Amino acid sequence: MPDPIDISILSRREFIAAGAAAAALAPFVARAEDPAPGTPAPSQKFKDDFARIAGSANPIEGKIMVDLPETAENGNFVPITIAVDSPMTDADYIKAIHLLSTENPAAHVATFHLSPVNAVARVQSRMRLAKTQDVVVLAEQSNGEMLISTTRVKVVIGGCGI
Amino acid sequence: MAANPRIKLPETAAIGDVIEIKTLITHVMETGNRHDKTGKPIPRDIIHAFVAKFEGKEIFRAEFGPGISANPYLAFHMRVPGPGVFEIAWTDDHGVTTVATAPLKLV
């Protein structure tokens, strides 16, 4: 945590600016240092696989629609549909969709390779979820940019044979 | 062991249509994390590679990890370039490839 700011020595303008900066950081600080009980924490395997797949790209949120149940009764069998908003032309298409899980024993669930011949960037499958966690989808665009989407799924009975 | 590969296509399609190709194969997708009754680990045995071709040309490919459910189901799309036959290949950890074909009926 940064040192607490001594309000008495700040002007009114500085005080407001400092407050805004602290408010902007708050969600990240809360996530990094003060996880609520039962909040999923990404595994080291997830961090490694994510770093390997994302490379030097800085993934941007948006354009990905992920359809997953809010609560999965059976973690062995969770239907998932991924659709990415893309014209899928030779000039602009989705090259690959990567599916990751933050707390499965094997974080990298699947990779789907696409090209303009597919016309729409949409895939459907069924995945395993060992417990309540986040499902992370990375979509690789033809210009090298990366898109990201994160979906929390509550799991009642875990999968993956654990 | 993979068995019973299935490909589901629309009954008919026209050139230029975007169609959905649904695929399914019977396979245990053993994760490698489980143990048998005697406590011995059950070795990993999954379908790890999926390749779809149309008229011999690759149109879609996927890699699976143990996080894909047993009896892997996968659906994807293609814009119909003309008449032809789909050829789908699933490869497991033993290196065994199971292939299924399905002709696309044009209107």
Image (tube, coloured by chain):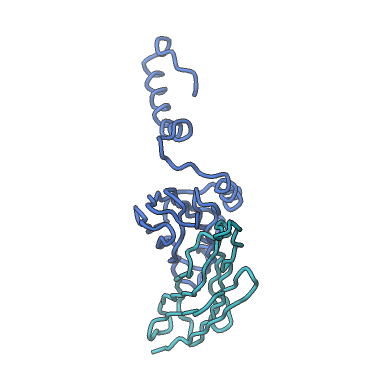
Chain colours: A blue, B cyan
Residue A56 percent across, percent down from the top left: 60, 47
In this rendered view, identify the residue nearer to me: A7 or A101.
A101
The answer to whether B83 is drawn above or below residue A18 in the figure is: below
> Furthest-right residue in view?
B95
The answer to whether B47 is drawn above or below residue A4 in the figure is: below
What residue is drawn where x is 43% and y is 13%? A6
Residue B5 percent across, percent down from the top left: 50, 79
In this rendered view, identify the residue nearer to me: A68 or A58.
A68
Q: Is residue A83 visible to us here? A: no
In this rendered view, identify the residue nearer to me: B36 or A51.
B36
The answer to whether A70 is drawn above or below residue B75 in the figure is: above
Residue B54 percent across, percent down from the top left: 53, 81
| Residue A25 relative to residue B88: left or right | left
| Residue A83 relative to residue A51: left or right | left
What residue is drawn where x is 44% and y is 71%? B75
Q: Is residue B11 visible to us here? A: yes
> Furthest-front residue in view?
B38
**Image quadrant in which you'd find residue A40:** top left
Residue A75 percent across, percent down from the top left: 42, 57
In this rendered view, identify the residue nearer to me: A46 or B17.
A46
The answer to whether B85 is drawn above or below residue A57 in the figure is: below
Total count of labels: 0
What residue is drawn where x is 46% and y is 61%? A127
